[in-house]
Image (cartoon, grey):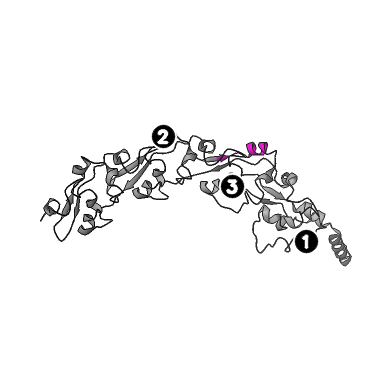
Amino acid sequence: MQLRLTLLAFLFLLATPLFSQAKETKDVQFKFDNADPVVFSHDIHLKQYNNNCRICHNAIFDLRKRRHFTMAEMEKTKSCGACHSGVKTFSVADEKSCDRCHKGKPRNITYKVKGATDAAFSHNSHLKSLGGKCKSCHNGKVITGKEGRVTMAQMEKGKTCGACHNGSKAFTVAGNCGNCHKGMTPKELTFKTKGISAASFSHKVHTGMFSCKDCHTKIFSYKAGAKHFTMEDMGKGKSCGACHNGKEAFSSSGDCDKCHKGFKPGNITFKTDSGDATFSHDFHLGMYKCIDCHTKVFPYKAGAKHATMGQMESGASCGACHNAKDAFSVAGDCEKCHKM
């Protein structure tokens, strides 16, 4: 009798449906910073493939090497795209099917930028203007998911936002800073230079006459101090000299104190075997302007260029003026310069 009961209990267990046991699979969530998660349902997929786990594991999804795939990779039959290719079922490349996996509304994205106010990207306004077509941007070319942050200069060449914000399809990224960087007031810039007082650049003064795109990034990158130029470079039209050329604005080669406030150049002493020679800026500025000598005759850095007395007699360096016509000749009266 006991044996018979045990046998019946065993047969009962064999006949018990599998669904009465503990569930071993669960939904998988793929989370995103700026959108609701994508939910993968094991139940739906197992039902479709008669509970055959091997259809996906590990041929498509290797549980030993877990990694994330981009939409561009899925469109090349990786990950979900192995089945969702438009043959067996809807394609991950089908723009009309985006919301079958991506439920809810995409959120606005805020980009924090050092030295400027945050830039805000509105999914709602862009989707409205593009007729809900996600792939206008998420197409593997404009935004791929792999590409890191880009500079404004790269955007001006068509990267990310610049693919549309080029002045044709939409306002250009080369100007209109306040359209994305709300409430932005560009700072005053101070350029510290060895041997001279700091030069100040006023955005407020310049933006009263020009727009951002007149200077950025054609003349200046958006990062202050990213590239340094000498006064000689400016005299050739580089940096500030692009406008400060004596035509559009005062020349960068003269009127030093307009940028370098309170600057008074000191005396310069040249040490020679014939006794030190002293050059007085005060004395010469009483008769000439900075532009008369810099940088046509002298570079701005003292001692950067040496000239012999023979070269001066031929019109180089001090000899450009000290030629017995404009001023006493360097060929005589040695003690006037050299304390012998």
Label 3 amino acid? Answer: Thr
Which of 330 and 60 lies nearest the eye of the viewer?
Answer: 330
Contact? badges 3 and 1 (CB < 8 Å): no
The residue shown at (75%, 60%) is 56
Contact? badges 3 and 2 (CB < 8 Å): no
* Residue topped by disc 3: 160
Q: Is residue 121 magenta?
A: yes
* Residue topped by disc 2: 204
Find numbered disc 3 in the image and state the secondary structure of the residue it sits on.
helix
The residue shown at (64%, 59%) is 67
Tell me how far mark 3 sits from mark 2, CA to CA: 29 Å
Judged left or right of residue 206, residue 54 is: right
The residue shown at (19%, 48%) is 267
Find numbered disc 1 in the image and state the secondary structure of the residue it sits on.
helix
Give the quadrant of the N terminus. Answer: bottom right
Q: Residues within 10 Å of mark 3 (few under 14, many from 20)?
A: many
